Every structure is written in C-alpha cells, then in structure tokens.
Amino acid sequence: MEEKRKKNLPTEPYGDLDLEMLRRFSEANGICGHEKGASRVMAEYLKDAADIIDYDNLGSLIACGKGTGGPSIALFGHLDEVGFLVKKIEDDGFVRIINVGGMWPHLLLAQEVTVTTRDGREYVGVISSPPPHGMPAEERAKVKQVEELFVDLGVNDADEVKALGIRVGDTITPRTEFRVLNNPNYLLGKAWDDRIGAAIATAVLRALRGVPHVADVYAVGTVQEEVGLRGAQTAGYAIHPDVAIALDVTLASDVPDSKYGTPLGSGVTLCLMDGSVICNRELVYIMEDLCNDLGISFVHDIFLRGGTDSGAIHKLFNGVLNMTISIPARAIHSHRAVIHRKDVVDTIMLLTEFCRRLDTDMVERIRCSNR
Ligand SMILES: [Zn+2]
C-alpha cells in the first residue's frame, strides 16, 4: 500500500510555491523568546496582504485580512525554533551553552551555529567535538550532554569573545542553508518546526488578497511554543477567534524504523488528537469534505503525546473551535529537517478555500456539533 502510494508521488516540482519565501522563513534566526528575526520576515511577506499587522506583548505577530462582516478565523504557526543561549564564556574563549527547547545532544557535535549579539551582530561558531582517537569504548558509546558541550568561535581567548560583543544570554541558533533536494519536492532546512506553519498561514493570507471573503482571516506567528505554548495563549486571547487552526509539523512515518506520524507527500494531514487537544470533529469532517471537493488527498494523524498551539488555544475563553493541521517533517528538532512540497501546497490550497467559504452558518454548525 505504502509502496504503491509512493510511486504516485511527483518527480517534477508540485504546484506553485514561493521557495524564496520558504528560504527566508527557514534561515531566519529566532529561538524561543527571541523570535524577532522570524517575525520580521513574516511581517515583510504580509505587508501587502494584511489590513492590520500588530503584535501582542510577548511578540507574537497578528495579521488580519478583513472580511465583509463574518466570523473570525485564525491560522497559527509558531515562529520560535529550538536553540541555545550563551551560558558562560570560558577564559580560553570557548562558549558554554544552555538549551532553550528540546534538542537531543546526539545531534549537536560538529554542527555550525550562529551566535547573535544583543546589537544584532552575527558570528559563526561550531559545537566542538572531541576526536575519537584513543577515546575509551564506554566514552564513545555515551551521548554528551548539553552541559558538556562548548562552541568554538575560532578566537584566542575570552577577551576576543567580549571584543566581538558576545555576552552571557546571547542567542545561539542552528546554522543551515535552505536546499531543494534531488527530487525537487523534498525541501531541506532548519526550523521547519514551525516556520513552515507560519509560512503557510502567511501564504493563505497572501492568496486571499483581492478574493472576496466574509470572515476576518488572521495569520498568526506565535512565540515561545517550544517552551510551553506560551505565545498562543496570549495571541489567542488578543484575537478571540471563532475558529482557530494550529499548523505544525508532525513526525514523518516514511523513514526507516519510524513508528509514528504520516508519510511525506501525503497531501493534507488532519490531526484528530494529540497529547494536548482532541480536535473538533465537525471541523475535521468539514476539512475532509473540502479536500474531496478540491481533489486533495488527506491522511489522519493521531497521537497520545506531544502538543501544539492548539493545546493552549482551545481552552481560552469559553472554548475556541479548533483543530490542528500537520506537515510531516523528517528529523524535527535537528539542524536539518526535510519536508515535502506537496504537503505545503495542498495545505495552502485547502485553507485558502476554507477561509474563503467560512461564514456564520458554518461556525454555528461547528459550534452546535458538540451539543
Ligand atoms: Zn512545533
């Protein structure tokens, strides 16, 4: 079954997609609590598409494309990525780090990083790795913990580090170039979790430019998701939407030994449940019908663990009608993740049409389905 489906996947670039926009979203530096680099990219791509662009006090970007007096829908993608802060500058100029959001230390040795100073200067460093020569067997088998790691900036000593303007608390971000892989539908980059969600929300608002729609459509780039869905709570509170959809990555099931998630290139991945939310079932049914209408393939994602911005949003006020739509990504929370163009293109198409059609009757139907 799997094999048959995979043979049907495109070998030519699927659909229309602004790859330069995806590159900008992926390469922007923005670890949790320091998302400005990413929110500025989002604002730039929304400035011609949104009627209002605003921020809440934690820094989440809230852009609105005004409708003609209908309900409101908000598409959430989180702008923060996992990374590090400078914890300590050693006398010999090596920089100790502390993680912000979860990254498996296994993935870190010999990786390039960008250190950003408070005045915005950027420096390349590498997470230093010990040579295996003469290393005892038990040491080789062990994963080094983040506290044991240090960044090599290629300088003489701490005085040179300070002269660069680097201080404790400065941000350290994975450094990875966006690339189109060998089948041009496979896109490699850092921070797909969850810049791809924010990019999809942006693309939907851009696609709706000049298209009549009754609903107010919000594209929201939330902050601090990776440390506990913090930005979604405040941004959701600021908007109070009738319907909220979180866009986030899910695990890729099409890699060796993977047990969870969905395969890349599935089209739309409709999440039914994860560790943070049970998605509104009527909303899921409406999305399924719409996929069928548009000739878009879809699969379901169902988990007991993990969570997305949906976990915070659906509990706001007296409850917000909500679901999650996922993009499968290989190697999430590493320097280099891979997504599939078809999943992005189909999700943009589905959500653009959903936002175009959403009206008060549909919201009432979703609301009443729980009663
Ligand atoms: Zn995420």
Image (cartoon, grey):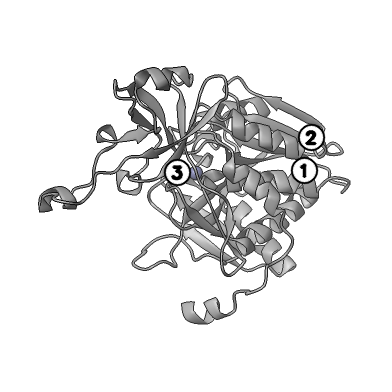
Determine the image quadrant of residue 265.
Answer: bottom right
Give residue 130's position: percent from left, percent from top.
Answer: 24, 44
Identify the element where label 2 is drawn.
loop
The answer to which of marks 1 and 3 sits earlier in the sequence is 3
Which label sits on residue 307? 3
> Which amino acid is tagged 1?
Thr
For disc 1, the marked residue is: 360
Give residue 99's position: percent from left, percent from top.
Answer: 37, 33
State whether residue 240 appears in this view: no
For disc 2, the marked residue is: 47
Label 3 packing within 10 angstroms: few (<14), some (14-19), many (20+): many
> Which amino acid is tagged 3?
Gly
Relative to 70, 104 lies left or right: left
Is 185 situated above or below 235?
below
Tell me if the residue at label 1 has its CB under 8 Å from ligand 1. Answer: no
Residue under the point 62% across and 74% down: 11
> Which amino acid is tagged 2?
Lys
Residue under the point 79% across and 35% down: 47
Determine the image quadrant of residue 169.
Answer: top left
Give residue 92's position: percent from left, percent from top.
Answer: 29, 24
Q: Nearer the viewer, mark 2 or mark 1?
A: 2
Please tell me how many numbered marks the rendered image carries: 3
